[in-house]
Image: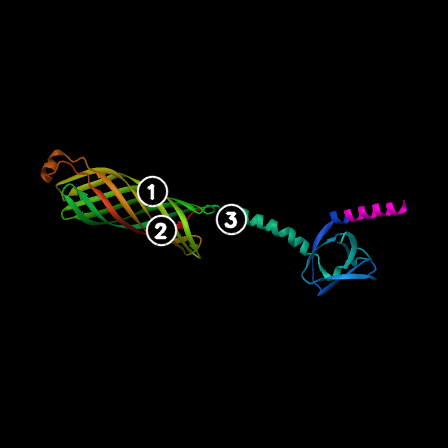
C-alpha cells in the first residue's frame, strides 16, 4: 500500500516536472547526470551541444535541475547548461513570424521607357521595312510571393516613310511570369494585347488622317535592380498590330488605292528605368 502511494506521488511529480519543462543546451564537454539531488550517484553524461528538456524548478539550493531519464527523474548541474536557449527556441518562431509579416507581398513600379520597333508595314501596295521610335510610361504590379507581374504600358512611336508619316499611340496590358531570379537580376516572360485608340497617317502638308487599331505581343524582359527603389529594364518582344484608316475619297483617289488598312509585324525593343513607389 505504501509502495503504491509513493509510486503515485512519484508519477505526479514527474508529470508536474514535464509540464513545467524548458529547453536547455549543454555547454560543458560532459554534463554528468545524477540519480540524486546531492550528486552522489552519477548515472551517465550528456555531450556538449545537446539540446535537452529540463524542469524549471531548481533543486539542492539552486544547483541542479530535474531531467527525465528513461521514465525516471534524474538531475543535472545548472552550471553545465545554457538555460537561455529555452527563450531562443521560443523567440525564433516568433521572430520568423514577425519577419514574414514584414515581408512585402506586392511591389508597384513606375517606369519611363524608350521604344524602338523594327517592323514590316504591309499594305495593298506591298511591303515596306520601317523603323519606329518613341517612348512611353509603364506601370508594374508585382506579386512577389507568386512571382507574377501585371504590366500596363502607354507608348507613342513614330516614323517617316519617304514623304509619309505614321504616328501610333497604344495602350498595352501584359501578364508576366518570373522564370529566373539570380541576385539583382530578374527574367520575365510575358504576353499581352494592345489597343490603339489613336494613330495618324499623313503626307507632309497634303493630308492628315486619324485611325485606330489593335495588336498582340509576347516577349522576354530582364530587370536589374540597383536597390529596392531603382531598376533598369531591357526587353524585346514580337508584335503584330492591325491598323484601320478611314481615308477620305479624295485621299484614296490621290493615292490610287481603295482602302488603307496596314498591318505592322516585327520586333520591338525597349529600355526603361523604374521607380518603386510603394
Quarter of the N terminus within the rendering: top right
Instruction: Find disc 1 in the rendering and name its residue.
Output: 192
Based on the picture, tell me whether residue 3 belongs to the magenta stretch.
yes
Find residue 103 and name its label: 3
For the image, the number of numbered tags is: 3
Find residue 67 and name its label: none
Q: Earlier in the sequence, mark 3 or mark 1?
A: 3
Q: Which residue is outermost to the top?
A: 249
Query: Residue 249's spot in the image, x, y percent?
Result: 12, 34
Query: Residue 265's spot in the image, x, y percent?
Result: 24, 45
Q: Earlier in the sequence, mark 2 or mark 3?
A: 3
Query: Residue 99's spot in the image, x, y percent?
Result: 55, 50
Q: Secondary structure at mark 1?
A: strand
Q: Residue 70, relative to residue 264: is it above or below?
A: below
Question: Magenta stretch?
Answer: 1-15
Discs 2, 3 touching: Cβ within 8 Å: no
Amino acid at each position: 500500500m505504501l509502495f503504491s502511494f509513493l509510486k503515485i506521488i512519484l508519477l505526479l511529480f514527474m508529470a508536474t516536472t514535464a509540464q513545467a519543462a524548458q529547453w536547455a543546451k549543454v555547454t560543458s564537454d560532459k554534463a554528468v547526470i545524477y540519480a540524486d539531488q546531492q550528486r552522489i550517484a552519477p548515472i551517465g553524461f550528456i555531450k556538449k551541444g545537446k539540446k535537452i528538456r529540463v524542469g524549471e524548478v531548481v533543486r539542492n539550493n539552486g544547483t541542479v535541475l530535474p531531467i527525465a531519464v528513461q521514465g525516471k527523474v534524474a538531475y543535472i548541474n545548472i552550471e553545465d547548461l545554457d538555460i537561455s536557449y529555452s527563450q531562443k527556441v521560443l523567440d525564433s518562431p516568433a521572430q520568423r513570424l514577425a519577419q514574414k509579416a514584414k515581408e512585402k507581398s506586392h511591389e508597384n513600379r513606375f517606369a519611363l521607357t524608350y521604344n524602338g520597333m523594327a517592323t514590316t508595314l504591309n499594305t495593298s501596295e506591298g511591303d515596306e521595312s520601317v523603323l519606329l521610335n518613341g517612348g512611353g510610361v509603364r506601370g508594374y504590379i508585382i506579386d512577389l510571393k507568386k512571382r507574377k507581374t501585371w504590366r500596363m504600358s502607354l507608348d507613342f512611336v513614330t516614323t517617316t516613310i519617304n514623304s509619309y508619316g505614321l504616328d501610333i499611340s497604344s495602350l498595352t496590358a501584359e501578364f508576366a511570369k518570373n522564370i529566373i531570379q539570380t541576385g539583382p537580376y530578374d527574367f520575365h516572360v510575358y504576353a499581352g494585347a494592345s489597343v490603339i485608340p489613336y494613330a495618324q497617317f499623313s503626307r507632309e502638308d497634303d493630308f492628315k488622317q486619324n485611325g485606330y487599331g489593335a495588336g498582340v505581343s509576347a516577349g522576354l524582359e530582364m530587370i536589374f535592380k540597383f536597390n529596392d527603389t531603382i531598376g533598369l529594364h531591357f526587353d524585346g518582344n514580337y508584335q503584330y498590330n492591325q491598323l484601320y484608316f478611314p481615308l477620305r475619297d479624295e485621299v484614296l483617289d490621290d493615292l490610287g488605292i481603295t482602302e488603307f488598312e496596314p498591318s505592322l509585324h516585327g520586333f520591338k525593343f525597349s529600355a526603361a528605368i523604374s521607380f518603386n513607389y510603394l
